[in-house]
Image (cartoon, rainbow, N blue to C red):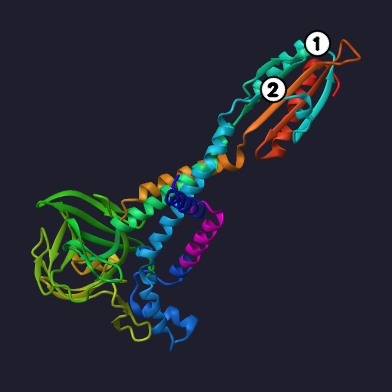
């Protein structure tokens, strides 16, 4: 081999040694953990003012802007998409791969090497050993021993030795030694899923007023439009409150997907019940009210004698006919949150959101004209003369639904990795490679007695295996009627 080749081999070996180091794994995990703490404290893709306020609690208001600029330059405002975070994941993945390949041949040899009989002195030096004497021939003892260890999951082998001695031996759980490597594989799968999600996925938001649609979402923080590849439309939005309070109980949106001018999917979404289409998921995250809607309608449910319930749509200042009657109604005014002052009895609007919406109606009959407010929460306020009821159902087109839009093509790999890790951790912690040798030989001073020597080992959970060995020995002695 030339000097150049030797030098090249030396570089390769040094690189292999570096990436197979446990110290490197500890350092990388520590750096990832510390950076993740910073990424948790600093809200990712948030508006600048919000993070400056957070940073000011640590460095003071005067230093916060400079600290923000430094952290932003280092990529901490969008840390999980930064080049250095991806590099750390790749380095840790490489470290896991090299560590696994470096140690796997030795472990594989332990798994695949056949178990062989041992000398008596070797059995006596094993970490687990037990002895007993029974009144039975070695052949009878060996049959019982074989049955007992087979019942415990061992595949028994029998070796006849000189002097009429017998040795029954076997092992189980050899492949449990691979548990830690399956854990490594699951971590790599999770990392791969995360990297795919970072590179080809996105996380953004979208506000849609009832009746509006969009073919883009907007990336958090930057506001950059992200093409969806289809159009999403909000047809209806609805909020339900707890009793007479202003605390929302449920908010939901009716969304539909359109492609090539056709509706291909429709669904009501709620919190924790999103809509997913072509790998993009729309979550119900917020809602709001537009005080100056450009295309809004008041929706009423009309009930009159001899007339089934009927929905009527009307705009502000528009007069509409009460079905089945000669009466009419006109929408005069609207309040998103109407309340009555307890001291003066005057009506006032106490919020700009749709907490307690009410509409002012002018009701005209041949007997005259009446004016009053109808509250959405209190349908009894819409009861009119002659059994006519005008229930305020909705102010369509005035509310918007706030959607969180997310695409994560690697999420299924993350789920797969987590499931695989759970199984592998169970194997790694609760299963072990167990070996057992049982030497059966006639007692030298008594032709009717047989001595039993048990030696065993386990690469982990030794105390648990000791208990199993004690139970096996007790079962053998009991079945043969001997003394321990």
Mark 2, other Cα within 10 Å: few <14 / some 14–19 / many ≥20: many
Name the side, left or right, on which 393 lies relative to 107. left
Question: Badge 1 is on which residue?
Answer: 137
Tell me the quarter of the image containing the C terminus.
top right
Magenta stretch containing residue 281, yes or no?
no
Position of 388 compared to 348: left or right? left
Majority secondary structure in the magenta region:
helix
Q: Is residue 96 above or below residue 348?
A: above
| Callout 2 touching callout 1 (CB < 8 Å) | no
The spot of residue 78 in percent (x, y) is 36, 68
Residue drawn at x 77%, y 13% is: 162
Residue 394 visible to the viewer: yes
User: Which residue carries the number 2 mark?
Assistant: 117
Residue at 72%, 31% (x, y): give it.
456
The location of residue 76, given as percent across then percent down, is 39, 71
Q: Is residue 405 above or below residue 437?
A: below
Query: Which quadrant holds residue 457?
Result: top right
* Front-most of residues 147 and 110: 110
Task: Give the magenta part as a residue range.
Answer: 19-35
Query: Does residue 302 appear left or right of residue 287 in this picture?
Result: left
């Amino acid at each position: 081999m030339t000097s150049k080749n030797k030098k090249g081999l030396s570089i390769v070996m040094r690189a292999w040694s570096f990436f197979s180091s446990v110290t490197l794994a500890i350092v990388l995990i520590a750096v990832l953990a510390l950076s993740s703490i910073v990424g948790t404290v600093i809200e990712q893709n948030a508006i600048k003012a919000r993070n400056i306020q957070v940073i000011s609690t640590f460095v003071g208001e005067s230093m916060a802007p400079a600290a923000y600029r430094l952290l932003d330059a280092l990529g901490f405002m969008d840390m999980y998409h930064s080049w250095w975070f991806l590099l750390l994941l790749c380095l840790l993945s490489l470290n896991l791969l090299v560590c696994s390949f470096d140690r796997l041949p030795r472990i594989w040899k332990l798994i695949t090497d056949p178990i062989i009989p041992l000398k008596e002195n070797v059995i006596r030096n094993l970490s687990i050993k037990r002895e007993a004497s029974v009144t039975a021939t070695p052949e009878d003892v060996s049959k019982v021993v074989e049955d007992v260890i087979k019942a415990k999951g061992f595949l028994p082998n029998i070796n006849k030795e000189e002097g009429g001695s017998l040795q029954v031996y076997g092992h189980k759980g050899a492949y449990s030694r691979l548990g830690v490597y399956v854990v490594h594989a699951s971590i790599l799968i999770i990392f791969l899923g995360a990297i795919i999600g970072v590179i080809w996925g996105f996380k953004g938001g979208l506000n849609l007023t009832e009746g509006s649609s969009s073919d883009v979402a907007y990336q958090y923080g930057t506001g950059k439009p992200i093409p969806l590849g289809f159009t999403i439309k909000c047809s209806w939005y609805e909020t339900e409150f707890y009793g007479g309070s202003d605390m929302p109980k449920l908010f939901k949106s009716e969304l539909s997907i359109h492609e090539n001018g056709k509706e291909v999917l429709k669904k009501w979404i709620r919190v924790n019940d999103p809509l997913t289409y072509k790998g993009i998921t729309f979550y119900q995250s917020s809602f709001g009210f537009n005080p100056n809607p450009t295309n809004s309608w008041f929706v009423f449910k009309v009930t009159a004698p001899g007339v089934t319930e009927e929905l009527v749509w009307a705009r502000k200042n528009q007069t509409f006919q009460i079905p089945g009657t000669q009466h009419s109604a006109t929408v005069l005014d609207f309040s998103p949150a109407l309340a009555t002052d307890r001291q003066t009895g005057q009506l006032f609007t106490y919020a700009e959101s749709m907490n307690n919406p009410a509409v002012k109606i002018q009701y005209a009959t041949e007997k005259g004209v009446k004016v009053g407010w109808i509250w959405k929460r209190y349908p009894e306020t819409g009861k009119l003369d002659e059994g006519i009821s005008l229930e305020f159902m909705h102010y369509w087109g005035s509310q918007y639904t706030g959607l969180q839009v997310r695409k994560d093509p690697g999420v299924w790999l993350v789920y797969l990795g987590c499931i695989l890790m759970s199984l592998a951790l169970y194997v790694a912690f609760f299963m072990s490679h167990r070996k057992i040798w049982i030497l059966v030989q006639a007692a030298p001073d008594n032709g009717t007695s047989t001595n039993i020597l048990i030696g065993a080992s386990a690469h982990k959970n030794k105390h648990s295996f000791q208990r199993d060995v004690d139970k096996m020995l007790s079962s053998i002695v009991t079945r043969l009627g001997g003394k321990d």
